[in-house]
Amino acid sequence: MTTESPESQSSESKTILSRRFLLKGAVLSAGAAGAAAAGVIGTGQDAQAAAETRNGAGYRETEHVRRAYEAAGF
Amino acid sequence: MARMKFLCDGERCIHCSGCVTACKNEHEVPWGINRRRVVTLNDGKPGQKSLSVACMHCSDAPCMAVCPVDCFYQTGDGIVLHNKDLCIGCGYCFYACPFGAPQYPSTGNFGGRGKMDKCTFCAGGPEADHSKAELEKYGRNRIAEGKLPLCAEMCATKALLAGDGDMVSTIYRERVLARGFGSGASGWSQAYGEQKRERAREGAGAPKDK
């Protein structure tokens, strides 16, 4: 039966932990960068599309509007 | 160019909620959302008055300033509209708005609120005027039809005024002169008092109101 010293165990677990953190960090940062890039591209495209369709007629003082103002003024 | 504004005359509002019903019916607003509502101030006390409140389409809109996805935009008439395709339902605009105008259709798990909904001044959204998509997402576009918001047109006592800011303020001024008193245009300094806010931003060196 072989027994490992507590020191060797702790050093091994530290190595595993640090490797885990390294891998986790790499995956998260790559994912975040991808998502940010997609978001920027997506938002840009959406904003452009929205700007193109903002072609509303807008307010006009029609006969209907004039009559509404007259009614409100009583 | 005309600047669109709302004004609720607190001396005339009788809390009939006709504006609320007209808005919900005209735009087929989803269950749980009121783009417009009537509130009573000093309820049961001297000076009690009711006011119809919705998005005031502020000059320097706080919702536009805080939106993380920049889904708000202001038309040439000063109407503050938003794009539901961009909205992520974060709720920042709700906390920023001094009038509590932005509404959310759901309160689900994990903070899911759905796309924000608010008064459009009956001016639709970013989609093409009178398109099916605009009708489904934002309701009818009465401004493009050459009309005014239905809440104001429907108001029985004409307490709620909407339209060109100069015309609205003229009508209100004439009323105040005729009856000899007025409680002021509620919310106007907050919504359209851009000069004060600019001065406040400039800091201590700016001239102060007396």
Image (cartoon, helix red, strand yellow):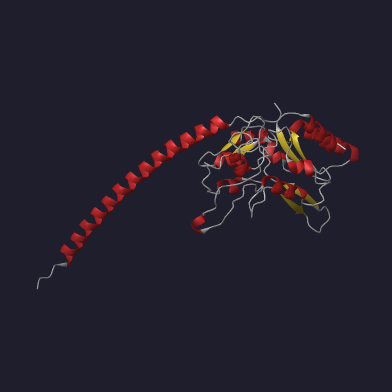
Left of B150 or right of it: where is A13? left
Q: Position of residue B123 (x, y in %)?
A: 66, 37
Image quarter in which the C terminus of chain B is found: top right
Q: Looking at the picture, how far across and down is residue B140, in whole percent?
A: 67, 40
Q: Is residue B134 visible?
A: yes
Image quadrant occupied by the N terminus of chain B: top right
Q: Nearer the viewer, residue A52 or B116?
A: A52
B95 lies left or right of B145 = left
At 63% from the left edge and 41% from the top edge, which residue is drawn? Answer: B135
- Left or right position of B132 against A48: right
Instruction: Name the residue rendered at 63%, 51% in the picture.
Output: B30
Query: In the rendering, at what x and y percent does residue B136 appear?
Result: 61, 44
Return the residue nearer the eye: B73 or B25: B25
Q: Is residue B8 visible?
A: no
- Please provide percent x and percent y for residue B58: 66, 38
From the viewer's perspective, is B105 left or right of B191? left
Residue B126 appears in which quarter of the rendering? top right
- Of all residues, the one furthest to the top in this rendering is B1
